[in-house]
């Protein structure tokens, strides 16, 4: 039987996340996430299967975009990802529920996130979890995306 647990990421274990996503592919993002962890602005939780890092998700407290964060009211769900060979097993839903519950516990009334419009699997999951309010629809260097909101109260 496979056992799983969700743990808060310790800063000294950050580079173990390379088991989930390719940290070398985007070094700028890798460093930015690390800096946010160190500063306390990013809270990351790891989904482990038999002590292997297979999924992660973060909550970001402040990012200077009011569509994503409003101090004390809206928190940003960032970089939720499951290792490719573990996808389509419900892990993303478990991580999303955990992050939403944690946001409530620490006093937030809203959770926001951004998702590429062509990422239909993620869009479906987020809508199923209550992220149904579209705050923004736009495009950046990575393509078309939407910013979604879930009210917790």
Image: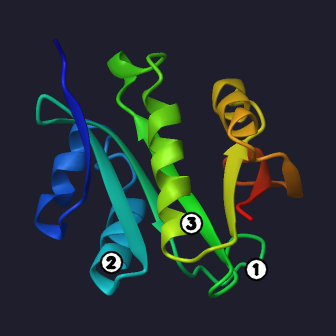
- Residue indicated by mark 1: 66
Asked whether the beta carbons under mark 2 and mark 3 sit within 8 Å of each other, the answer is no
Query: Badge 2 local density, few (<14 within 10 Å), some, or many (20+)?
Result: some
136 on left or right of 105:
right
**Taking 126 as reference, is 38 above or below it?**
below
Q: Name the residue: 40% across, 65% down.
A: 28
- Residue indicated by mark 2: 35
Query: Badge 3 local density, few (<14 within 10 Å), some, or many (20+)?
Result: some
Q: Name the residue: 64% across, 87% down.
A: 71
23 on left or right of 82:
left
48 on left or right of 102:
left
Q: Quadrant of the C terminus?
A: bottom right
The figure's colour scheme reads rainbow
**Taking 25 as reference, is 8 above or below it?**
below
- Residue indicated by mark 3: 104
| Nearer-N-terminus badge (1/2) | 2
| Nearer-N-terminus badge (1/3) | 1
Structural distance between the alpha carbons of marks 2 and 3: 24 Å
Query: Badge 1 local density, few (<14 within 10 Å), some, or many (20+)?
Result: few
Q: Which of the two marks, 2 or 3, is nearer to us in this view?
A: 3
Q: Nearer the viewer, residue 59 or 21?
A: 59
Dividing the picture into quadrants, the one containing residue 11 is bottom left
């Amino acid at each position: 039987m496979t056992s799983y647990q969700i743990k808060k990421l310790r800063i000294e274990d950050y580079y173990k996340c390379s088991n989930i996503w390719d940290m070398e592919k985007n070094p700028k993002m890798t460093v930015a996430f690390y800096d946010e962890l160190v500063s306390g602005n990013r809270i990351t939780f790891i989904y482990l299967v038999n002590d292997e890092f297979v999924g992660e998700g973060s909550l970001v407290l402040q990012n200077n975009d009011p569509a994503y964060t409003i101090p004390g009211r809206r928190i940003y769900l960032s970089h939720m990802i499951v290792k490719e060979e573990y996808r389509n097993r419900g892990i993303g839903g478990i991580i999303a529920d955990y992050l939403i519950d944690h946001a409530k516990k620490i006093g937030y009334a809203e959770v926001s996130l951004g998702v590429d419009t062509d990422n239909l699997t993620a869009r479906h999951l987020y809508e199923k979890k209550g992220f149904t309010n579209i705050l923004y629809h736009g495009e950046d260097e990575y393509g078309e995306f939407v910013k979604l909101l879930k009210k917790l109260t």
